[in-house]
Amino acid sequence: MVGILDARPRVGYFYTGKTSLGYVSDEIKRILVEDVKSMPVVLDESTSIYDAIVFMFLEDVGSIYITNDGVLSGVISRKDIIRSVMGGTDLYKIPIGVIMTRMPNIVYVEPKDSVLSAAKKLIDHEIDSLPVVEVIEKDKNIYRVIGRITKTTITRLFVELGSND
Amino acid sequence: MVGILDARPRVGYFYTGKTSLGYVSDEIKRILVEDVKSMPVVLDESTSIYDAIVFMFLEDVGSIYITNDGVLSGVISRKDIIRSVMGGTDLYKIPIGVIMTRMPNIVYVEPKDSVLSAAKKLIDHEIDSLPVVEVIEKDKNIYRVIGRITKTTITRLFVELGSND
């Protein structure tokens, strides 16, 4: 394949200069975080690790975001939980606030970011989940959680893109 | 956009009848499991849950395949481990063979399957990882593990496809 001609109504055909892989890339770049994000699953810092695990199973998610009055303060993953178990942490007594990853060390995305940049962050930072936030005050790290993007989101999107006949 | 004309050397242009989303789907369907699979991470059934967790962290994977003389006998995930912790299982004494998902209940793919079908299986069965197997004897459920496909594989592939300029 050399390149692709595109067609527009009442204009005719024009040479796009693209290969079909270029088209794939264009279509992927066009998708925004806000188009595919799922609902965030949030808990309070004072929740015990045990209750957080139960909540994780009930909601069937691998990561939970921790908020204070709606403001993102931390993230906890299955990996964090297993690590705390290995360290002999008392799951019933210790609150998730003790073992969570805390701001400003949380990698996040915004609704108008491309899904491609979100997927890159998931790979580069070796994480399973990204909170989608609305920036309230950047200097003070005040972000409101409004969604989540996970490797499941990307895999589901991949299936959708592959099923467009 | 109405449709795409494709070009072939010494043939000229022809109407493909495709939209650009159709191209995306075609490119995705063309990718096979064997093109993108990673190395499998395997352990023996007699390994303790504790040792399996340590191995999981060292290898930085979310799932481990359990084999007997190279033949797939089970799969264990972070979720399985957390569930066993909640049930009060002694991590040091109980072998992974006790808590793993056992054949024939394991969803797998073969090297010549499309990555799209693998991604569909990950979504439909709500799992994070699929062993890539070579079928030795189907009736007796004898499969040799030769790789793995995870949601990370799909996310990495998505990033690659989106970065083809």
Image: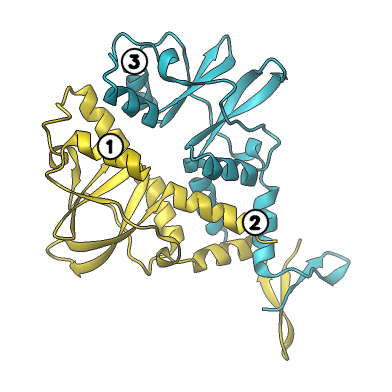
Chain colours: A cyan, B yellow
Secondary structure of the residue carrying numbered label 1: helix
Indicate the amino acid at tag 3.
Asp
Chain bearing tag 1 is: B
Residue behind mark 3: A51
Structural crowding at the residue carrying mark 3, measured as other residues with C-alpha within 10 Å and reported as few (<14), some (14–19) or many (≥20): some
Would residue A144 appear left or right of B153 to someone viewing this image?
Answer: right
Label 1 belongs to which residue?
B54
x then y, percent, for residue A37: 58, 35
Between circles 3 and 2, the one closer to the viewer is: 2
Query: How far across and how far down the image is residue A99, in percent?
Result: 41, 19
Q: CA distance from mark 3 to mark 2?
A: 41 Å
In front: label 3 or label 1 = 1
**Dot 1, crowdedness within 10 Å: few (<14), some or many (≥20)?**
some
Which residue is denoted by mark 2 in the rendering?
B163
- Give the class, few, some or many, for how many residues have Cα within 10 Å of label 2's Cα (few <14, many ≥20): some
Q: Is residue B26 left or right of residue A140?
A: left
Q: Amino acid at mark 1?
A: Val
